[in-house]
Image (spheres, helix red, strand yellow):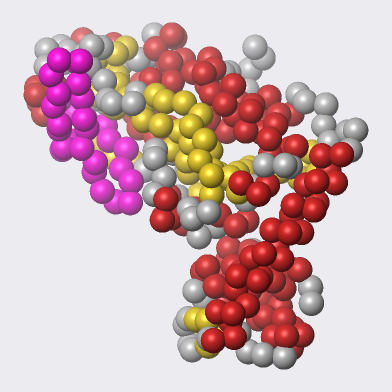
């Protein structure tokens, strides 16, 4: 019995089809099917019931599933224990993040990680919210923007890295043409630049510590990429609603200014998700500690190609 076959079996069960598992694993579908057949031959039992588009566990598969998970965790724990005993750390660390603001949040973590005296192969990937849960078994740690649903990440441990707020921003020339509002209720009179997620426009929740208000913007400009929204604001297209850390450099350079600076969103959490049985892995423990310590500096990190 080969460990890789068991990994493939677990991903097929998670994905619900061979095709989806192949995409997650970035392997040909025929290769995934071969792994499954070889595992079933070694066990002397069929584990899955297949139809045209999906697979599901049969009785033998349901018996084998918890054993498969135990085998994988035992092997991972053994590997981590050996690596922890080595004088010099090495190996591979696999990190994934939700797509929103990943370059900001992940870059500072990996640059700090690269400074450590370790020989690491680093993999950093971003994925949309709605597929990250399915891919979770392929990663050692997941950085998640906003509180993750426990049901979407079963058996993963959660650590809070930090919090941030959203605020309103616009270019000076836009505000010269359209004087700034005095209250969020007036925002409907302005061109609003909106980041959308999953083809939906989400409400903007704002508070000044005394009053709270909710606005569902009618956007003049939309994009699912926050960098494009920020660029539109810099070029005077309207008012945007962005994390304060994401707009810090533009504000410092005078390209953007806060609008209604006393108003902001509630705090949004950023969380690290990891497999608790892997915490003995010194690379993972180091990554989590660096992620926690570096989060407070994400608004100070240099995100340009120029020298500091």
Where's residue 51, x and y in %?
A: 49, 89
Residue at the image point whose x is 80% and y is 53% from the top: 78
Q: Which residues fall within the magenta stretch? A: 190-218
Q: Is residue 235 above or below residue 177?
A: below
Between 77 and 272, the residue placed more toward the observer is 77
Is residue 206 located in the magenta-colored stretch of the structure?
yes
- What percent of the width, then of the height, locates residue 111? 68, 26
Q: Closest to the observer: 57 or 67?
A: 67
Say left or right for 83 vs 285.
right
Residue plotted at (73% across, 59% down): 74
Q: Is residue 165 left or right of residue 75?
A: left
Residue 219 found in image quarter: top left
Q: Is residue 299 visible?
A: yes
Q: How many marks?
A: 0
Task: Determine which quarter of the picture holds residue 73.
Answer: bottom right
Residue 122 colored magenta? no
* Residue located at (64% from left, 28% from top): 289
From the top left corner, tell me how far across and down residue 263 is, in percent: 22, 17
For this rendering, which residue is in front, 305 or 272? 272
Q: Is residue 181 visible?
A: no
x, y percent for residue 37? 69, 85
Q: Is residue 21 above or below residue 253?
A: below
Q: Say which quadrant the N terminus sits in.
A: bottom right
């Amino acid at each position: 019995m080969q460990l890789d076959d068991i990994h493939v079996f677990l991903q097929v069960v998670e994905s619900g089809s061979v095709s989806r598992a192949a995409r997650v694993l970035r392997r040909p579908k025929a290769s995934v099917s071969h792994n499954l057949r070889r595992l079933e031959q070694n066990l002397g039992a069929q584990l899955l019931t297949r139809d045209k588009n999906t697979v599901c566990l049969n009785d033998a598969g349901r018996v084998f599933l918890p054993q498969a998970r135990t085998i994988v965790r035992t092997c991972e724990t053994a590997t981590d224990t050996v690596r922890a005993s080595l004088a010099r750390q090495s190996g591979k660390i696999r990190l994934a993040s939700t797509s929103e603001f990943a370059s900001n949040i992940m870059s500072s973590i990996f640059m700090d990680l690269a400074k450590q005296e370790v020989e690491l192969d680093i993999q950093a990937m971003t994925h949309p919210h709605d597929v990250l849960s399915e891919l979770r078994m392929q990663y050692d740690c997941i950085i998640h923007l906003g509180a993750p649903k426990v049901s979407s990440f079963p058996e993963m441990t959660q650590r809070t890295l930090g919090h941030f707020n959203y605020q309103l921003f616009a270019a000076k020339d836009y505000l010269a043409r359209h004087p700034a509002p005095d209250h969020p209720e007036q925002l409907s009179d302005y061109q609003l630049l909106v980041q959308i997620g999953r083809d939906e426009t989400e409400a903007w929740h704002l508070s000044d510590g005394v009053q709270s208000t909710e606005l569902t913007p009618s956007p003049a400009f939309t994009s699912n990429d926050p960098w494009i929204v920020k660029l539109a604001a810099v070029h005077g297209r309207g008012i945007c609603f962005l994390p304060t850390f994401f707009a810090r450099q533009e504000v410092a350079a005078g390209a953007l200014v806060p609008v209604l600076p006393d108003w902001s969103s509630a705090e949004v959490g950023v969380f690290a998700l990891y497999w608790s049985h892997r915490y003995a892995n010194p690379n993972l423990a180091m990554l989590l500690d660096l992620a926690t310590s570096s989060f407070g500096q994400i608004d100070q990190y240099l995100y340009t190609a120029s020298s500091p």
